[in-house]
């Protein structure tokens, strides 16, 4: 898990000025942070709009239509419902927490301006209070973790790393805190220590204003574009705060991930390269039930080194990308294929003595460029003073999720060569699964 902390505005803004220490005594007073994400479920159409409509109907029936309004942050998922997501955060040291507007280009299709407002932490999605349960009985449990890594058809020497955690059950009383934990945990073996991912996100905190927010949030329409001129206005905002978003910093296209091969075989993954991609990363996991309260969790990543996990599916800065490309943690931008080692995701779960299929899940991320804009620009002559008025950080990425063993093609994906598979080759289709769900 990544450590979560609120990144102070001054520290984050200082990242925009990597070589400015001799020219600028302090970071700019106004700092804007824009995150653009494209998410998808491989082989599936975007469901965000459809489920949003269903959610709106249910919310109205329950007297809470505002529950369907997207609220910052929305860009930190890794696929699922699909669509384009946009987060905007502004810290104005001159007038902290005061409303501001982003006058947007028509291509974003969200009106003339995004209204940025403060958000009280926890106010957008209140958690209902639940009574604290009394003493409970914890059963004996066993979890085995099997760790694999690297692209290739075969399992490499020295893999998997295996760790088994056994919990000897007992009583647990949450009212007594840690003293109420009457269980014994034993671990054997080991898996790799996870890679540390710096947290550079802007979380909800006092002094900032955000979009989307409970009052002005809207879903981003399909096909919307950030490209064009943006102008930030509001109390204390410099009149000069106007900038251009280039096509290279626009929403990234969807990742069109394809799969070939059964879970018992080596699974070949391929995708058309994205022009904006700086690097790629894929991870997978498969949970199996081996019997009553006995589980096996298989994890795999496309990295050439152990320890890379799901925490990498986030925004990574240029320095982190360069470092992990050199260390072969990430796949280079020119990569368009990767093989999952043979059989690591094979087998289902044992439910009441019978095997039940529980497919593994894959997550893939394409890391887009990160762009910093400061005004006025840094002078070429280091002897000249430099006191920037504002900065903008713009980050992009595209992520998708997929089920191992499913045919990802046929829905919004590039077509195959047109040759129909033989009956013995045919795999479960995402299109067929969706058709069954929707009854279409």
Image (spheres, rainbow, N blue to C red):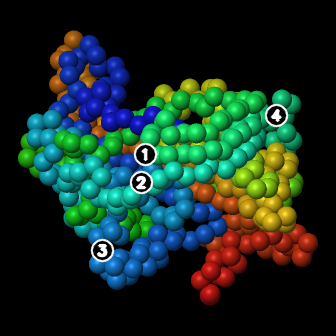
Q: Which badge, 1 or 4, is on the more N-terminal residue?
A: 4
List the single residue furthest toward the left. 235
Residue placed under numbered mark 3 in the picture: 64
Residue placed under numbered mark 2 in the picture: 132
Residue 371, can we see it? Answer: no
For this rendering, which residue is in front, 439 or 33?
439
Q: Is mark 4 on a helix, strand or loop?
A: loop
Closer mark to the observer between disc 2 and disc 3: 2
Q: Which badge, 1 or 3, is on the more N-terminal residue?
A: 3
Residue 402, can we see it? Answer: yes
Q: What element carries label 2?
A: loop
Q: Position of residue 68 (x, y in %)?
A: 35, 70
Closer mark to the observer between disc 2 and disc 4: 2
Neighbor class of circle 2 (other Cα within 10 Å; few <14, some 14-19, many 20+) is few
Q: In this view, does 109 lie to the left or right of 81?
A: left
Instruction: Kindly indicate whether the residue at mark 1 contacts the one at mark 2 (C-beta within 8 angstroms).
Output: yes
Residue placed under numbered mark 1 in the picture: 175
3D distance between C-alphas at marks 1 and 3? 33 Å
For this rendering, which residue is in front, 24 or 114?
114
Residue at (49, 35) in percent of width and height: 179
Q: Is residue 30 left or right of residue 204?
A: left
């Amino acid at each position: 898990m990544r450590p979560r902390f609120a990144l102070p505005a001054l520290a984050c803004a200082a990242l925009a000025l990597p070589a400015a220490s001799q020219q600028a005594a302090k970071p700019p007073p106004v700092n804007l942070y824009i995150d653009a994400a494209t998410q998808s479920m491989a082989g599936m159409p975007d469901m965000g709009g459809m489920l949003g409509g269903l959610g709106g109907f249910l919310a109205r029936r329950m007297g809470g239509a505002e529950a369907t309004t997207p609220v910052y942050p929305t860009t930190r998922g890794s696929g699922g419902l699909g669509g384009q997501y946009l987060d905007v955060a502004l810290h104005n040291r001159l007038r902290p927490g005061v409303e501001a507007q982003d006058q947007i280009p028509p291509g974003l299709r969200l009106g003339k301006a995004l209204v940025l407002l403060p958000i009280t932490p926890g106010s957008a999605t209140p958690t209902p209070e639940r009574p604290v349960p009394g003493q409970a009985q914890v059963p004996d449990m066993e979890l085995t973790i099997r760790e694999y890594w690297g692209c290739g058809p075969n399992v490499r020497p020295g893999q998997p790393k295996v760790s088994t955690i056994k919990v000897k059950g007992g009583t647990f009383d949450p009212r007594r805190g840690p003293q109420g934990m009457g269980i014994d945990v034993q671990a054997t073996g080991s898996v790799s220590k996870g890679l540390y991912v710096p947290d550079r996100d802007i979380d909800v905190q006092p002094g900032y204003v955000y979009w989307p927010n409970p009052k002005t949030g809207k879903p981003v329409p399909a096909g919307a574009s950030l490209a064009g001129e943006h102008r930030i206005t509001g109390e204390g905002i410099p009149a000069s705060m106007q900038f251009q978003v280039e096509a290279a910093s626009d929403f990234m296209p969807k990742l069109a991930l394809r799969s070939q091969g059964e879970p018992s075989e080596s699974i070949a993954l391929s995708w058309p390269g994205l022009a904006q991609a700086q690097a790629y990363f894929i991870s997978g996991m498969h949970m199996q039930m081996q019997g009553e309260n006995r589980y096996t969790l298989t994890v795999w990543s496309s990295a050439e080194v152990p320890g890379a996990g799901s925490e990498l599916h986030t925004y990574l800065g240029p320095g982190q990308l360069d470092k992990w490309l050199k260390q072969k943690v990430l796949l280079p931008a020119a990569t368009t294929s990767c093989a999952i080692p043979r059989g690591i995701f094979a087998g289902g779960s044992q439910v009441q003595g019978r095997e039940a299929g529980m497919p593994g899940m894959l997550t893939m991320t394409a890391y887009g460029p990160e762009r910093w804009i400061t005004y006025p620009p840094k002078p070429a002559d280091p002897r000249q003073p430099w006191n920037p008025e504002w900065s903008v950080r713009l980050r992009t990425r595209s992520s998708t999720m997929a089920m191992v063993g499913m045919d990802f093609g046929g829905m919004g994906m590039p077509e195959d060569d047109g040759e129909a598979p033989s009956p013995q080759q045919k795999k479960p289709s995402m299109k067929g699964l969706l058709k069954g769900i929707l009854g279409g």
